[in-house]
Amino acid sequence: MKKKVVILAGGYSKEREISLQTGKEVFKSIKKKYRATIIDPKGDLVQKLKKIKPHVVFNALHGRFGEDGYIQSILEKERIKYTHSGVRSSSIAIDKDLSKKIFNKHKILTPYSIKMKYSKLNKKKIQTDIKKKFKYPVVVKPINEGSSVGVYICNKQNIFKSLDKLKNYNEVLIEQYIPGKEIQVAIMGKRKLGAIELVPKRKFYDYKAKYNKNANTKHIMPANISKDNYEKAMNIALKAHKLLKCRGVTRSDFKFFNNKFYLLELNTQPGMTALSLVPEIARYKNISFFKLLLWIINDASINK
Ligand SMILES: Nc1ncnc2c1ncn2[C@@H]1O[C@H](COP(=O)(O)OP(=O)(O)O)[C@@H](O)[C@H]1O
Ligand SMILES: [Mg+2]
C-alpha cells in the first residue's frame, strides 16, 4: 500500500504563490509513489490531518507561519513526521538578525547590520547613525521575509522612501550593501551538494529576477569561482547548517566580494519547484527532482 503524504502549500505569507507552485510540482512528481494530497493550511488544518493520518507531511510552505517554526510546532504536537528543519532551527533561521548574530559569533562573516524600529520621528538620528556605521549604498529589509520581498538597496537620497515602504513591519534590518557575485549553496543532510551563481540582469536578485523568466537571470552551475573558493562556500554553508542544527535540505545565500563570502541568510524551506535552485544544484550531482523529493520524504522526522 502506498504511503500517505500530505503536502502543505500556500499558507499566509507573502510567498504564498511560490509555495502553491512548489506544492503542485511536488505533488506531480511524487504521486506515482505516494498517496499524495495538497493541503492549504487554514484554521481546520489539525482536523484535516487527524482525518487523513499521513505518514509524512511534506512542508512546501515558505516564509512566516510555514518556515518559522509555527507549523513545525503543530506537527510536533500532533506527532506527525515532517520534512526539513525543526521548530527551533526554523525560528532562528527565519530571523535574519538573530541568525546573523549566531553566525558572527562563530566566525561566519555576514554583512554588518543593525536592527531598528522605524518611526518617522527619528529620521535625523537614523541618518546620522547610518552615516557613522555604514557606507552608502545600504540595504533595508524585513527581518523575517523571503523571496526578496521588501528588500531595497538605498542611497542617502531614497532611504526614507524605502523605509516608509517597510513601515508595517515592526522592525527592519539595515545592512551594509556588498557588491560582487551572488552565490547560493545547497546542503542536503550532511552533504555539501554544490554552489550556483546567479547573474541577474536587474539591479539585484529581486523577486522578478528570481521568478520571472523574462527577467533572464543567468544561472551558472557550478558557480564560476576557483575550486578552493567553491569548497570554501560549501564549507561555510555546512557549518551554518550544523550551527543552527538544521535538517533536510537548506540553501545558504552569499555575496562574494574581495575573495570573501558574506552569508546573507540560511533558508530552511528553499524553493522546491523543478526550476528552483536546490533542484538545479541536485541535478548537477545526478540527483533528479524526483530522487531529491524521495530523499526529503525519507528524511522526515519529529523530535528535532
Ligand atoms: N547586504 C546585501 N548586499 C548586497 N545585496 C544584498 C544584500 N542583502 C540582500 N541583497 C540582495 O537581495 C537578495 C535577497 O536578500 P536576502 O537577504 O537573501 O533575503 P530573502 O530572504 O528575501 O531572499 C539577495 O539575494 C541579494 O541579491
Ligand atoms: Mg535570500
Image: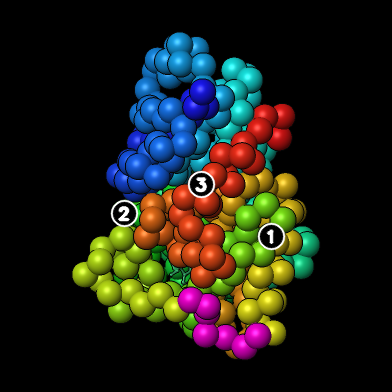
Which label sits in the foreground, 3 or 2? 3
In the displayed structure, 300 sits above or below 152; it is above
Observer-nearest residue: 300 or 179? 300
In the displayed structure, 204 sits above or below 48; it is below
Observer-nearest residue: 3 or 153? 3
Tell me what residue is drawn at x 52 percent, y 51 percent.
291
User: How far apart in space, not on screen, are marks 3 and 2 (Cα)?
Assistant: 37 Å
Helix, strand or loop: magenta stretch: loop
Give the secondary structure at mark 2: helix
Residue denoted by label 1: 191
Tell me what residue is drawn at x 69 percent, y 84 percent.
228
Badge 1 local density, few (<14 within 10 Å), some, or many (20+)? few
User: How far apart in space, not on screen, are marks 3 and 1 (Cα)?
Assistant: 15 Å
Percent from the top left, x then y, of residue 117? 49, 49
Percent from the top left, x then y, of residue 51? 45, 11
Q: Which label's residue is closer to the chain start, 3 or 1?
A: 1
Residue denoted by label 3: 293
- Callout 3, which amino acid? Leu
Badge 2 local density, few (<14 within 10 Å), some, or many (20+)? few
- Callout 2, which amino acid? Lys
Tell me what residue is drawn at x 48 percent, y 76 percent.
221
- Callout 1, which amino acid? Arg
In the displayed structure, 7 sits above or below 229; it is above
Residue denoted by label 2: 165
Q: Quadrant of residue 302?
A: top right
Disc 2 within 8 angstroms of ligand 1 (CB): no
